[in-house]
Image: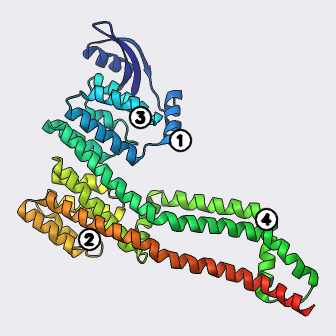
Protein backbone atom coordinates (compact mmCIF):
# COMPACT_ATOMS: atom_id res chain seq x y z
CA UNK A 1 0.00 0.00 0.00
CA UNK A 2 1.00 3.62 -0.50
CA UNK A 3 0.77 6.21 2.27
CA UNK A 4 0.89 10.00 2.08
CA UNK A 5 3.01 11.39 4.84
CA UNK A 6 4.08 14.64 6.44
CA UNK A 7 7.19 14.48 8.56
CA UNK A 8 9.99 16.58 9.98
CA UNK A 9 13.71 16.04 9.69
CA UNK A 10 16.01 16.30 12.69
CA UNK A 11 16.82 19.83 11.51
CA UNK A 12 13.13 20.73 11.65
CA UNK A 13 12.46 20.84 7.89
CA UNK A 14 9.02 19.72 6.71
CA UNK A 15 8.85 16.79 4.27
CA UNK A 16 5.86 15.52 2.28
CA UNK A 17 5.57 12.58 -0.09
CA UNK A 18 4.60 8.94 -0.58
CA UNK A 19 5.93 5.85 1.16
CA UNK A 20 5.13 2.26 0.24
CA UNK A 21 4.55 -0.26 3.05
CA UNK A 22 2.31 -3.17 4.01
CA UNK A 23 0.62 -1.18 6.80
CA UNK A 24 0.48 2.26 8.40
CA UNK A 25 2.70 1.08 11.27
CA UNK A 26 5.28 -0.23 8.80
CA UNK A 27 5.19 3.10 6.94
CA UNK A 28 5.89 4.97 10.19
CA UNK A 29 8.78 2.61 10.92
CA UNK A 30 10.27 3.24 7.45
CA UNK A 31 10.08 7.00 7.99
CA UNK A 32 11.75 6.73 11.38
CA UNK A 33 14.54 4.58 9.96
CA UNK A 34 15.21 7.34 7.43
CA UNK A 35 15.62 9.91 10.20
CA UNK A 36 12.16 11.46 9.84
CA UNK A 37 9.65 12.29 12.55
CA UNK A 38 6.14 11.37 11.26
CA UNK A 39 3.48 14.02 11.73
CA UNK A 40 0.76 12.58 9.51
CA UNK A 41 0.53 9.21 7.70
CA UNK A 42 -2.61 8.43 5.66
CA UNK A 43 -3.45 5.79 3.07
CA UNK A 44 -3.23 6.83 -0.57
CA UNK A 45 -5.74 4.32 -1.95
CA UNK A 46 -6.15 4.23 -5.75
CA UNK A 47 -9.86 4.90 -5.36
CA UNK A 48 -9.27 8.07 -3.38
CA UNK A 49 -9.97 11.53 -4.67
CA UNK A 50 -6.28 12.27 -5.32
CA UNK A 51 -5.80 9.05 -7.25
CA UNK A 52 -8.98 9.61 -9.25
CA UNK A 53 -7.93 13.14 -10.18
CA UNK A 54 -4.52 11.88 -11.31
CA UNK A 55 -6.19 9.18 -13.44
CA UNK A 56 -8.51 11.74 -15.05
CA UNK A 57 -5.56 14.04 -15.68
CA UNK A 58 -3.61 11.13 -17.20
CA UNK A 59 -6.47 10.33 -19.60
CA UNK A 60 -6.91 14.01 -20.48
CA UNK A 61 -3.27 14.93 -21.04
CA UNK A 62 -1.22 11.72 -21.22
CA UNK A 63 2.54 11.68 -21.73
CA UNK A 64 3.83 11.51 -25.30
CA UNK A 65 7.07 9.93 -26.46
CA UNK A 66 8.25 13.36 -27.55
CA UNK A 67 7.82 14.72 -24.02
CA UNK A 68 9.68 11.75 -22.54
CA UNK A 69 12.48 12.17 -25.08
CA UNK A 70 12.89 15.85 -24.16
CA UNK A 71 12.85 15.10 -20.43
CA UNK A 72 15.58 12.44 -20.63
CA UNK A 73 17.68 14.66 -22.92
CA UNK A 74 17.45 17.46 -20.37
CA UNK A 75 18.11 15.06 -17.51
CA UNK A 76 21.23 13.66 -19.21
CA UNK A 77 22.55 17.20 -19.80
CA UNK A 78 21.96 18.24 -16.17
CA UNK A 79 23.55 15.11 -14.72
CA UNK A 80 26.53 15.50 -17.06
CA UNK A 81 26.93 18.97 -15.53
CA UNK A 82 27.06 17.28 -12.08
CA UNK A 83 23.62 18.54 -11.04
CA UNK A 84 22.05 16.11 -8.48
CA UNK A 85 19.15 13.96 -9.70
CA UNK A 86 16.70 15.54 -7.22
CA UNK A 87 17.60 19.06 -8.32
CA UNK A 88 17.43 18.01 -11.99
CA UNK A 89 13.95 16.56 -11.57
CA UNK A 90 12.78 19.68 -9.74
CA UNK A 91 14.16 21.92 -12.50
CA UNK A 92 12.58 19.85 -15.28
CA UNK A 93 9.20 19.58 -13.52
CA UNK A 94 9.03 23.36 -13.12
CA UNK A 95 9.36 23.97 -16.86
CA UNK A 96 7.24 21.15 -18.28
CA UNK A 97 3.80 22.21 -19.55
CA UNK A 98 2.18 18.80 -19.05
CA UNK A 99 0.53 19.02 -15.63
CA UNK A 100 0.24 15.26 -15.18
CA UNK A 101 3.92 14.78 -16.02
CA UNK A 102 4.78 17.60 -13.61
CA UNK A 103 2.98 15.69 -10.83
CA UNK A 104 4.83 12.47 -11.73
CA UNK A 105 8.24 14.19 -11.70
CA UNK A 106 7.43 15.86 -8.39
CA UNK A 107 6.49 12.51 -6.83
CA UNK A 108 9.70 10.96 -8.18
CA UNK A 109 11.72 13.76 -6.62
CA UNK A 110 10.02 13.20 -3.25
CA UNK A 111 10.56 9.44 -3.45
CA UNK A 112 14.28 9.85 -4.18
CA UNK A 113 14.60 12.32 -1.30
CA UNK A 114 13.02 9.68 0.94
CA UNK A 115 15.74 7.17 0.06
CA UNK A 116 14.33 5.46 -3.02
CA UNK A 117 16.57 4.83 -6.04
CA UNK A 118 15.92 6.53 -9.37
CA UNK A 119 14.88 3.26 -11.05
CA UNK A 120 12.49 2.45 -8.18
CA UNK A 121 10.87 5.88 -8.51
CA UNK A 122 10.39 5.22 -12.24
CA UNK A 123 8.91 1.80 -11.48
CA UNK A 124 6.13 3.43 -9.44
CA UNK A 125 4.77 4.97 -12.67
CA UNK A 126 4.41 2.07 -15.18
CA UNK A 127 1.92 4.03 -17.29
CA UNK A 128 4.56 6.63 -18.05
CA UNK A 129 7.87 4.73 -18.06
CA UNK A 130 8.10 1.36 -19.82
CA UNK A 131 10.06 -1.65 -18.66
CA UNK A 132 12.93 -0.92 -21.03
CA UNK A 133 13.51 2.53 -19.55
CA UNK A 134 13.44 1.15 -16.01
CA UNK A 135 15.94 -1.62 -16.81
CA UNK A 136 18.37 0.74 -18.54
CA UNK A 137 18.31 3.16 -15.62
CA UNK A 138 18.75 0.31 -13.12
CA UNK A 139 21.76 -0.96 -15.08
CA UNK A 140 23.24 2.54 -15.02
CA UNK A 141 22.81 2.73 -11.25
CA UNK A 142 24.53 -0.63 -10.77
CA UNK A 143 27.43 0.23 -13.10
CA UNK A 144 27.79 3.75 -11.70
CA UNK A 145 27.22 5.40 -15.08
CA UNK A 146 23.71 6.81 -14.77
CA UNK A 147 24.32 9.66 -17.22
CA UNK A 148 25.24 7.21 -20.02
CA UNK A 149 22.16 5.09 -19.31
CA UNK A 150 19.91 8.15 -19.45
CA UNK A 151 21.41 9.00 -22.85
CA UNK A 152 20.66 5.44 -23.99
CA UNK A 153 17.05 5.91 -22.85
CA UNK A 154 16.75 9.26 -24.67
CA UNK A 155 18.20 7.76 -27.88
CA UNK A 156 15.90 4.74 -27.67
CA UNK A 157 12.78 6.86 -27.12
CA UNK A 158 13.82 9.17 -29.96
CA UNK A 159 14.24 6.26 -32.39
CA UNK A 160 10.88 4.77 -31.40
CA UNK A 161 9.26 8.21 -31.68
CA UNK A 162 10.59 8.78 -35.20
CA UNK A 163 9.58 5.25 -36.24
CA UNK A 164 6.03 5.72 -34.94
CA UNK A 165 5.82 9.16 -36.57
CA UNK A 166 6.73 7.70 -39.97
CA UNK A 167 3.95 5.12 -39.76
CA UNK A 168 1.37 7.62 -38.55
CA UNK A 169 2.40 10.06 -41.28
CA UNK A 170 1.90 7.40 -43.95
CA UNK A 171 -1.54 6.39 -42.64
CA UNK A 172 -2.84 9.86 -41.76
CA UNK A 173 -3.56 10.97 -45.35
CA UNK A 174 -5.65 7.94 -46.44
CA UNK A 175 -7.43 7.82 -43.08
CA UNK A 176 -8.32 11.51 -43.35
CA UNK A 177 -9.57 11.17 -46.95
CA UNK A 178 -11.68 8.10 -46.12
CA UNK A 179 -13.12 9.77 -43.00
CA UNK A 180 -14.11 12.92 -44.92
CA UNK A 181 -15.50 10.92 -47.84
CA UNK A 182 -17.49 8.70 -45.48
CA UNK A 183 -18.93 11.68 -43.62
CA UNK A 184 -19.91 13.47 -46.84
CA UNK A 185 -21.42 10.26 -48.22
CA UNK A 186 -23.47 9.78 -45.04
CA UNK A 187 -24.81 13.36 -45.23
CA UNK A 188 -25.58 13.10 -48.97
CA UNK A 189 -27.43 9.78 -48.69
CA UNK A 190 -29.31 10.81 -45.51
CA UNK A 191 -30.40 14.37 -46.23
CA UNK A 192 -29.71 15.34 -49.87
CA UNK A 193 -30.56 12.16 -51.80
CA UNK A 194 -34.21 11.93 -50.54
CA UNK A 195 -34.85 15.50 -51.73
CA UNK A 196 -33.39 14.78 -55.19
CA UNK A 197 -35.41 11.57 -55.63
CA UNK A 198 -38.72 13.32 -54.87
CA UNK A 199 -38.90 14.32 -58.54
CA UNK A 200 -38.49 10.71 -59.71
CA UNK A 201 -41.13 9.44 -57.28
CA UNK A 202 -43.63 12.15 -58.26
CA UNK A 203 -43.27 11.27 -61.96
CA UNK A 204 -44.41 7.69 -61.22
CA UNK A 205 -42.44 6.32 -64.19
CA UNK A 206 -40.51 3.05 -64.55
CA UNK A 207 -37.00 3.31 -63.13
CA UNK A 208 -34.00 0.94 -63.17
CA UNK A 209 -33.55 -1.48 -60.26
CA UNK A 210 -30.36 0.20 -59.08
CA UNK A 211 -32.16 3.58 -58.93
CA UNK A 212 -34.91 1.96 -56.88
CA UNK A 213 -32.29 0.63 -54.43
CA UNK A 214 -30.77 4.10 -54.01
CA UNK A 215 -34.21 5.68 -53.45
CA UNK A 216 -35.12 3.10 -50.80
CA UNK A 217 -31.70 3.50 -49.17
CA UNK A 218 -32.10 7.29 -49.04
CA UNK A 219 -35.60 7.02 -47.54
CA UNK A 220 -34.42 4.52 -44.94
CA UNK A 221 -31.41 6.63 -43.94
CA UNK A 222 -33.52 9.79 -43.77
CA UNK A 223 -35.89 8.11 -41.33
CA UNK A 224 -33.54 5.94 -39.28
CA UNK A 225 -30.16 7.72 -39.59
CA UNK A 226 -29.84 7.93 -35.81
CA UNK A 227 -30.21 4.15 -35.47
CA UNK A 228 -27.61 3.57 -38.19
CA UNK A 229 -25.24 6.01 -36.51
CA UNK A 230 -25.68 4.31 -33.10
CA UNK A 231 -25.16 0.87 -34.68
CA UNK A 232 -22.00 2.08 -36.46
CA UNK A 233 -20.54 3.62 -33.29
CA UNK A 234 -21.45 0.51 -31.31
CA UNK A 235 -19.78 -1.75 -33.87
CA UNK A 236 -16.68 0.47 -33.93
CA UNK A 237 -16.48 0.43 -30.13
CA UNK A 238 -16.91 -3.37 -30.06
CA UNK A 239 -14.17 -3.87 -32.63
CA UNK A 240 -11.88 -1.49 -30.74
CA UNK A 241 -12.55 -3.29 -27.45
CA UNK A 242 -12.02 -6.74 -29.00
CA UNK A 243 -8.72 -5.87 -30.66
CA UNK A 244 -7.50 -4.37 -27.36
CA UNK A 245 -8.24 -7.61 -25.50
CA UNK A 246 -5.55 -10.26 -25.21
CA UNK A 247 -7.06 -12.68 -27.75
CA UNK A 248 -8.08 -9.88 -30.11
CA UNK A 249 -4.65 -8.26 -29.99
CA UNK A 250 -3.00 -11.56 -30.90
CA UNK A 251 -5.44 -12.09 -33.78
CA UNK A 252 -4.75 -8.56 -35.03
CA UNK A 253 -1.01 -9.23 -34.87
CA UNK A 254 -1.54 -12.25 -37.12
CA UNK A 255 -3.79 -10.33 -39.55
CA UNK A 256 -1.28 -7.48 -39.93
CA UNK A 257 1.40 -9.96 -41.01
CA UNK A 258 -0.87 -11.33 -43.77
CA UNK A 259 -2.13 -8.13 -45.45
CA UNK A 260 -0.40 -7.58 -48.82
CA UNK A 261 2.14 -4.72 -48.86
CA UNK A 262 1.31 -3.87 -45.23
CA UNK A 263 2.88 -7.11 -44.00
CA UNK A 264 6.28 -6.12 -45.43
CA UNK A 265 6.10 -2.71 -43.79
CA UNK A 266 4.99 -4.27 -40.48
CA UNK A 267 7.82 -6.83 -40.60
CA UNK A 268 10.39 -4.09 -41.18
CA UNK A 269 8.94 -2.03 -38.32
CA UNK A 270 9.11 -4.94 -35.86
CA UNK A 271 12.66 -5.87 -36.90
CA UNK A 272 13.70 -2.24 -36.48
CA UNK A 273 12.22 -2.13 -32.98
CA UNK A 274 13.82 -5.44 -32.07
CA UNK A 275 17.28 -4.49 -33.31
CA UNK A 276 17.33 -0.92 -31.96
CA UNK A 277 15.92 -1.76 -28.53
CA UNK A 278 18.08 -4.85 -28.03
CA UNK A 279 21.18 -2.91 -29.12
CA UNK A 280 20.32 -0.12 -26.66
CA UNK A 281 19.76 -2.57 -23.79
CA UNK A 282 22.96 -4.52 -24.41
CA UNK A 283 24.91 -1.30 -24.93
CA UNK A 284 23.54 -0.11 -21.58
CA UNK A 285 24.98 -3.14 -19.80
CA UNK A 286 21.86 -5.35 -19.58
CA UNK A 287 22.63 -9.12 -19.78
CA UNK A 288 21.57 -10.78 -23.04
CA UNK A 289 18.78 -12.93 -21.58
CA UNK A 290 17.25 -10.04 -19.65
CA UNK A 291 17.64 -7.74 -22.67
CA UNK A 292 15.77 -10.22 -24.88
CA UNK A 293 12.94 -10.55 -22.35
CA UNK A 294 12.58 -6.77 -22.08
CA UNK A 295 12.68 -6.40 -25.87
CA UNK A 296 9.83 -8.91 -26.21
CA UNK A 297 7.67 -6.57 -24.09
CA UNK A 298 8.30 -3.47 -26.22
CA UNK A 299 8.43 -4.95 -29.73
CA UNK A 300 4.68 -4.41 -30.24
CA UNK A 301 3.66 -7.75 -31.80
CA UNK A 302 2.84 -10.97 -29.94
CA UNK A 303 4.20 -13.19 -32.74
CA UNK A 304 7.59 -11.52 -32.68
CA UNK A 305 7.48 -11.39 -28.87
CA UNK A 306 7.18 -15.19 -28.75
CA UNK A 307 10.12 -15.59 -31.13
CA UNK A 308 12.29 -13.29 -29.00
CA UNK A 309 11.25 -15.12 -25.80
CA UNK A 310 12.21 -18.43 -27.43
CA UNK A 311 15.57 -16.89 -28.28
CA UNK A 312 15.96 -15.84 -24.62
CA UNK A 313 15.27 -19.40 -23.47
CA UNK A 314 17.80 -20.71 -26.00
CA UNK A 315 20.50 -18.30 -24.81
CA UNK A 316 19.72 -19.19 -21.19
CA UNK A 317 20.54 -22.87 -21.92
CA UNK A 318 23.79 -21.96 -23.69
CA UNK A 319 22.50 -21.77 -27.27
CA UNK A 320 22.50 -18.96 -29.81
CA UNK A 321 19.59 -16.64 -30.59
CA UNK A 322 20.43 -16.79 -34.31
CA UNK A 323 19.53 -20.50 -34.29
CA UNK A 324 15.98 -19.65 -33.21
CA UNK A 325 15.68 -16.80 -35.72
CA UNK A 326 16.64 -19.15 -38.56
CA UNK A 327 13.54 -21.23 -37.77
CA UNK A 328 11.28 -18.27 -38.67
CA UNK A 329 12.37 -17.16 -42.17
CA UNK A 330 9.01 -15.43 -42.88
CA UNK A 331 9.18 -13.25 -39.76
CA UNK A 332 12.97 -12.86 -39.55
CA UNK A 333 14.70 -12.44 -42.94
CA UNK A 334 17.70 -14.80 -43.40
CA UNK A 335 20.06 -11.81 -43.74
CA UNK A 336 19.10 -10.69 -40.21
CA UNK A 337 19.65 -14.17 -38.76
CA UNK A 338 23.02 -14.37 -40.51
CA UNK A 339 24.15 -10.95 -39.23
CA UNK A 340 23.08 -11.84 -35.69
CA UNK A 341 25.07 -15.08 -35.98
CA UNK A 342 28.16 -13.14 -37.08
CA UNK A 343 27.70 -10.74 -34.17
CA UNK A 344 27.46 -13.64 -31.71
CA UNK A 345 30.59 -15.29 -33.11
CA UNK A 346 32.66 -12.08 -33.08
CA UNK A 347 31.31 -10.69 -29.80
CA UNK A 348 29.98 -7.54 -31.51
CA UNK A 349 26.28 -8.32 -31.30
CA UNK A 350 25.26 -4.84 -30.05
CA UNK A 351 27.16 -3.16 -32.90
CA UNK A 352 25.69 -5.54 -35.49
CA UNK A 353 22.15 -5.01 -34.18
CA UNK A 354 22.65 -1.26 -34.35
CA UNK A 355 23.54 -1.60 -38.03
CA UNK A 356 20.52 -3.85 -38.66
CA UNK A 357 18.27 -1.30 -36.96
CA UNK A 358 19.61 1.56 -39.10
CA UNK A 359 19.17 -0.43 -42.33
CA UNK A 360 15.57 -1.45 -41.65
CA UNK A 361 14.74 2.03 -40.37
CA UNK A 362 15.77 3.34 -43.80
CA UNK A 363 13.61 0.63 -45.41
CA UNK A 364 10.62 1.76 -43.34
CA UNK A 365 11.31 5.36 -44.35
CA UNK A 366 11.30 4.46 -48.06
CA UNK A 367 8.18 2.28 -47.75
CA UNK A 368 6.17 4.88 -45.85
CA UNK A 369 6.95 7.48 -48.53
CA UNK A 370 5.99 5.06 -51.32
CA UNK A 371 2.88 3.89 -49.48
CA UNK A 372 1.23 7.29 -49.79
CA UNK A 373 2.02 7.31 -53.51
CA UNK A 374 0.51 3.82 -53.93
CA UNK A 375 -2.62 4.61 -51.93
CA UNK A 376 -3.51 7.81 -53.81
CA UNK A 377 -4.67 6.04 -57.05
CA UNK A 378 -6.70 3.58 -54.99
CA UNK A 379 -8.46 6.42 -53.16
CA UNK A 380 -9.15 8.24 -56.42
CA UNK A 381 -10.70 5.10 -57.95
CA UNK A 382 -12.76 4.46 -54.79
CA UNK A 383 -14.12 8.02 -54.71
CA UNK A 384 -14.77 7.87 -58.46
CA UNK A 385 -16.85 4.71 -58.04
CA UNK A 386 -18.95 6.40 -55.35
CA UNK A 387 -19.58 9.46 -57.51
CA UNK A 388 -20.32 7.23 -60.51
CA UNK A 389 -22.94 5.23 -58.61
CA UNK A 390 -24.81 8.40 -57.64
CA UNK A 391 -24.52 9.83 -61.16
CA UNK A 392 -25.72 6.71 -62.97
CA UNK A 393 -28.33 5.78 -60.38
CA UNK A 394 -29.96 9.18 -59.82
CA UNK A 395 -28.91 11.91 -62.25
CA UNK A 396 -29.15 9.81 -65.43
CA UNK A 397 -32.79 8.76 -64.78
CA UNK A 398 -33.66 12.42 -64.06
CA UNK A 399 -32.11 13.50 -67.37
CA UNK A 400 -33.97 10.71 -69.21
CA UNK A 401 -37.29 11.71 -67.67
CA UNK A 402 -36.67 15.38 -68.50
CA UNK A 403 -35.86 14.41 -72.09
CA UNK A 404 -39.20 12.59 -72.48
CA UNK A 405 -41.20 15.63 -71.39
Q: Residue at x 41, y 34 (%)?
A: 96
Instruction: Give the image location of residue 52, x and y in percent.
Output: 52, 33
Q: Cα distance, mark 2 to mark 3?
A: 41 Å
In the drawing, does residue 394 fall left or right of residue 273? right
Foreground disc of the pair 1, 4: 1
Residue wearing tag 4: 224
Distance Cα–Cα, label 3 vs label 1: 16 Å
- Judged from the image, the secondary structure of the residue bearing numbered disc 3 is loop
Question: Contact (CB < 8 A) between labels 1 and 2?
Answer: no
Cα distance between the residues tagged 1 and 4: 34 Å
- Mark 3 and mark 1 lie on one chain; the one further toward the N terminus is 1
Give the image location of residue 102, x and y in percent.
42, 32
Label 1: element kind: helix
Give the structural element (helix, strand or loop) at label 2: loop
Q: CA distance from mark 1 to mark 2?
A: 38 Å
Q: Note whether 328 is above or below 318 in the view shown.
A: below
Check residue 96 in the rendering and tell me which mark sits there, or answer none: 3
Residues at circles 4 and 2 in contact by the CB criterion of under 8 Å:
no
Q: Which residue carries the number 2 mark?
A: 332
Residue beneath disc 1: 60
Q: Is residue 15 above or below residue 199?
A: above
Viewer-nearest residue: 332 or 89: 89
If you read the primary sequence from the N terminus, does the residue marked by circle 4 or circle 2 appear first?
A: 4
Badge 4 element: helix
Direction from residue 384 to residue 49 in the image, left or right: left
Q: Is residue 186 above or below residue 44?
A: below
Instruction: Name the quadrant containing residue 351.
Output: bottom left
Disc 4/disc 3 C-alpha distance (Å)? 48 Å
Ranked by sequence position, the earlier of labels 2 and 3 is 3
Amino acid sequence: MKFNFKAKTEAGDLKEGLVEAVSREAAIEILQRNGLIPLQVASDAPGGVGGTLRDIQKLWEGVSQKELMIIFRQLATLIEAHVPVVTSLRTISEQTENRYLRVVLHEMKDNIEDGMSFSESLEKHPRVFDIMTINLIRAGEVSGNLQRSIEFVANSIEKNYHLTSKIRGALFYPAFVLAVAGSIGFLVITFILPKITILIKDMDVPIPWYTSILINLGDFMNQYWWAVLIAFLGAAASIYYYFHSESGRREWDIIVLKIPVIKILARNVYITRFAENLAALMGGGIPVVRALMVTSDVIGNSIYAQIVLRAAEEVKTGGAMSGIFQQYPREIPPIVSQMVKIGEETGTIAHVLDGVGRFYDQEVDVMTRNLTTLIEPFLIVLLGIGVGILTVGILMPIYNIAGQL
